[in-house]
Amino acid sequence: MTILRYLFYILVFPGALFTIAVGLFMAGIDRKVIAHMQKRVGPPLRQPMYDFFKLLGKETIIPAKANRAAFLAAPVLSFVSLCFIMLFIPIFGFTAINGAADMIVILYLVTIPGAALIIGGASSGSPFASIGISREMVTMMAYELPFVLVLLTVAKKVGGDQLVFNLSLVSDYQAVNGSLLSHWSMIPAALAMLLVIPAEVGTQPFDVAEAENEICEGPLVEYSGSPLALFKLSINMKMIIMTGLFTSMFLGGIRTGFVALDALLFVIICIAVMLVSITTIHAVTARLKIEHLFKFYWTVVAGLALVSTILVWIGM
Amino acid sequence: MFKKLIDKSAAKSPWLFHLNTGSCNGCDIEIVACLTPRYDAERFGFKLAGSPRHADILVVSGPITVQSRDRLIRTIEQTPDPKCVVSIGSCPKSGNVFKGSYGIDGPLDKYVHVDVSVAGCTPKPEAIMEGLYKAALILEKKREAMHK
Amino acid sequence: MIQHFPVLAVMGMFLGAFLIEIFGSKNAAVRNAISFITFTVVAGLVYALVKPIIIDGGVIAYWMGNWEPVAGYAIGIGYEVDALGLVFAIIAITAFWISNLYSFGYMKGEHHLGHYYTLFMMLCGSILGFCMTGDLFNMYIMVEIMTFSAVALTGFITEKDGALEAALKYLVLCSLGSGFILTGIALIYLQCHTLNIAQLASMLSGGLTPTTLLAFALTVAGFGVKSFMVPFHTPLADAHAVAPSPISMVLSGVVTKAGVYGMIRCIYIMFRAMDLTQMQIIITAFGAVTMFVGVSMALAQHDFKRLLAFHSISQVGYIITAAGLGTALGLTGGIFHAMNHMLFKGLLFLAAGAVLHQTGGVTNLDKLGGLSKRMPHTTVCFLFGAAAISGLPPFNGFASKWLIYQAAYTKAAETGNFYYLIITITALVVSVMTLASFVKIAQAVFFGQLSEENKDVKEAPAIMLVPMYILAALCLLTGIFYRPIAADFILPAVRSAVDVVKYIDVMMGEGYAAAAGVYNMAVSNVMVSSWSPIVYLILFVTVFIAAFIVILGSKSDRGATVEVDPKNAMKHSNFFSGEEAVYSHVGGSDMLWGYKYDFKPYYRVMEELHSGRVTDYCNMVVIATAIIVVFMFMFMR
């Protein structure tokens, strides 16, 4: 019985199907809103779904110089690990898997899709891909520092005398004390997290790893067909996962009592977060160079997060 | 399982890869103009892809210069099926003003089957979009043909 | 009978070394047989001690020559094996056994192999003796034998460029460390008139006089030199680059741990200073600096084995930080990480050795590439090791790093000291930088494009692949079953590190500790965390299978995967903007450019410090020792 329940969690809600559906929907909203910001109509909301199925219908060409096993396994690894992460994020009071130290596990699990992209790029044997994975790795190094600082800040704020990493406890704390964003000492940390989200998802101005024109799509240059479909899907799934993490950490005080209604509100708030952090920044900026990106994250964003950490540590 | 959805999606989400085989850039500017807010090709799902492996429609402009000929053939070979080749402007179709020159080598259909040809020098963005749209519909037919 | 096993193990090793020197110089078969049998027998002896010591929680005390203490004073050399020492001895003998197997294949064809195996066995014997002895001067002797064997083995392949120079640096710097240890021992003997660790533990627990304080600082610094913390780390990088790969594996996997074990024995048992905040602060400070300097220097290297050496230094930093936190959870994480480090670092060095061996000596990251097509088994083993060291679940690196993070942030929360939060952040960031470094190696060596010179490289022979696969399997298994290992294997070691009363009583007689006024510090119960890797593994496998079925099934719905068609080679060649694919491999120096650009000022300073001159390195050692001495005198009077 428990096995069936866990299978439902993994495959339907909040696992694979939910993440895929909401991720594709959010990606569609993102494109539509950018189009309207640019005073044009834009693709229909179902466009990412069409993209996914079209890619499933293309033939898969594996380059002769590529390492076949790693080439085909990387997208599956990326997709699988992303299906898991959603299980740890509390949807306003409902958490599929409740562990003692969720946030650090999520930190590591979020590294895995990036590592899968890197493995996929490395195995293609193309120099464009090699440069792409080098940039992807530097991007990951760049946003880990502020990400870690934000996690520790939230843990200290919620726990008081001890550090609480359990996300459902964070959510419960917010149900009692109001969402963390309303505590003014957490605002710099929230800003830092909002800036970490586009780097994770890989949109402008932090998408130097997958620069379309500059290095011909970077690590994905040799991918076609269903592996490419899985990678593109992973990018879309990351949208809901990262905004979901932000929502549960900073905006998690809502409790309606019904899981379905909670999930609906959760998705709406995630879309709002996405519009602020991913869409707006995407629409108004150009691409940063890799050295500027690294410097930006380790100075400005880490500085913001550190301000919050110090404020929380001294008790505010 | 998702046969019909996959077939329909082939026409709904055509990704473009632009190949310039020695063009004067006039057609290239008009192609980029298609994606601007005034003409907005993206509402049909068109998107510029960075790698031919991701592309469905290969948009070729320019008379096929001798230097770019091998690169053109190689890039087209590297595109996965189902694919369409669209030639933009009169240069790939007939050579336009460069016909007979020592530096160019023949119309595009000497090397690959051209699915849609948009004539003009330069063709208007609306014409380019109509051509691309027709290519997207041809893509759907090619996708259905792949089932056999 | 069983109390003779420790001495028999050590003596057996030395006897084997002696036998090889006599019989094994000419005949390879005799030599291999003697070494294999010796190692297996000694391993059996050491593993036989697991039951009484670790499972039953006992301590074995053995007086050499039966010189029991007279009137409460120890006059003989005592061997005392408690769980702490046994865990390190097991780490040592396992690494040496596997390395021995690997040496059979790797060193084939070298000259003077008789001397190699002799030195190898002396190195092993000395480390076993070091971990199992209860006498301070005996520890020094064993450390000296270890140092000299290691020096000789480092410079073993004398034709190699830089081998003798590296051996010289190792010799000079480690002799400096040994000098500090000897001075410390002399000072202790001056003050306490005994050399037995158990008796010293009971005498020194009352308070520290200036003499013993100086001795403490010097012994800690000396063992720090042996464990290659920063700034004592410089000979290790050079030594690893030139030593034969099985020796590199042992140097980084075991010799560094011997230094750490010495530090733990001194601080936890002999001087019992671990509950002092100042002690914790300075040890964790050194540990944190070691972590960061190790990994940042590693990111700038372009020699494969030198890069792995700097990673060793960084991981030793993790161990020292964890041990320096002073909590039971920290020490558990530290010792567990020591064991895991031996496993995954050994695996990485063996893989590097395989690459070196098969390509005829090429370790420059810019000159390798694309080897995964020619050496698939080595690639798989390397990827296991890389995933383990980066701390990706479900490998063992994640399990032990997890415990270290938990210990660090629990300490930060308990003491409310922001300093420990910085330690936690450093540990987490260094982990992702480690991942970056291994991505760089994977791309530069195994993926990417195959160059013309390496076109005919063959896979490593089976005798070299078997140890690698053993280590890879152990990495995965210790990661999945980390909870029983941490609870049943590591925790007894931690308990014995804290249970000084038992240590003293077993050696010197019942009630000695109580009479001297020694009591145990209260230590909180170690709660091994609730992260359960088996659940993850099962879930991963389930979804993997589902994904594969979905992708590979229903072929008519999607385009077929086209195999490489020899008639249509263009289709399957890499996209080069239409050009014909030429050799353009992105090598090690080209990777991670953005990071290196931003850290240029830092690297300029580091380059100055790592000048290559022995005198500069000696300066660093002396200055760091002076800092330790001054710190202790200022804050611990």
Image (tube, coloured by chain):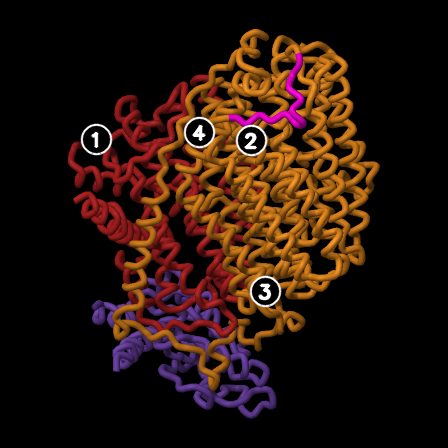
Chain colours: A red, B purple, C orange
Left or right: residue C140 versus residue A162 is right
Q: Is residue C260 shown above or below A27?
A: above
Query: Which subunit holds the residue at mark 2?
Result: C
Eyeballing the image, is B30 above or below C436?
Answer: below
What residue does disc 3 label? C460
Identify the mark nearer the N-term, 2 or 4. 2
Residue C69 magenta-highlighted: yes
Which amino acid type is shown beneath numbered disc 4? Asp
* Stretch of the chain drawn in magenta: C59-70
Q: CA distance from mark 4 to mark 3?
A: 43 Å
The residue sitting at 26% across, 26% down in the picture is A175
Q: Position of residue A37 (x, y in %)?
A: 36, 50
Q: Secondary structure at mark 1?
A: loop
Label 4 Cα crowd, 10 Å radius (few <14 / some 14-19 / many 20+)? few
Q: Label 1, on which residue?
A: A255
Q: Is residue C254 magenta?
A: no
